[in-house]
Image: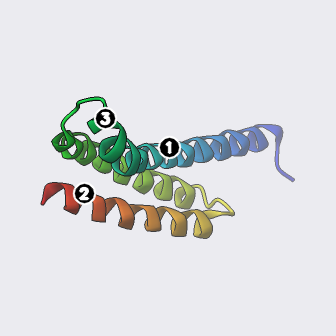
Amino acid sequence: MESISELNSTEVTDSDDVRTFSFSMIISAVRCALTYVVFPFIAPTLGFSSGVGPWVGVPLSIVGIAANTLSISRFWKNNHRWKWQISTLNVGVIILLSVLLVNDIT
């Protein structure tokens, strides 16, 4: 039987894993919203140049890829029960962000 301190450390670890996953998804969502809504439609109507997108997109893609990688690492390090599902989702997001990153660089 697990002691109370072991149970509490598991809860904290699960909470940290979920927080890291949530952060990585938020960064990725912001990146996509900027790419597909703000830069092509809203920025030009407000008089902003459409060429500003890559200057914001490249750093956000890099941060998003790093955050998703960290999320995968945490779930596996802690042997979380959802590690396969979360890893699959994170890898999919990393692939999409990588495509956007290459698109912004070119």
Label placed on residue 26: 1
Q: Nearer the viewer, residue 31 or 66?
A: 31
Q: Amino acid at mark 2?
A: Leu
> Looking at the image, which residue is at 70% across and 46% down?
10
Estimate how packed mark 3 is, as few (under 14), some (14 to 19) or many (20 or more) residues with alpha carbons within 10 Å. few
Identity, as a three-letter code, of the amino acid under mark 3? Thr
Residue 22 in picture, x, y percent from top left: 56, 45
* For residue 103, side relative to residue 60 (left or right): left
Q: Secondary structure at mark 2?
A: helix
Indicate which disc, 3 or 1, sits on the residue closer to the N terminus: 1
Residue 45 - label: 3
Q: How many marks?
A: 3
Whole-percent x, y for residue 92 in the image: 46, 68
Direction left: furthest residue: 106
Q: CA distance from mark 3 to mark 2?
A: 25 Å
In which quadrant of the rendered image does the C terminus lie?
bottom left
Give SS at disc 3.
helix
Residue in view at x 50 percent, y 43 percent:
26
Identified at 29% across, 65% down, the residue is: 99
Give the x, y percent position of residue 44: 27, 38
Relative horizontal placement of residue 31, taking residue 14 as reference (left or right) = left
Query: Which residue carries the number 2 mark?
Result: 101
- Pointers 1 and 2 in contact (CB under 8 A)? no
Q: Residue furthest right?
A: 1
| Precedes in sequence: disc 3 or disc 2 | 3
- In front here: 5 or 102? 102
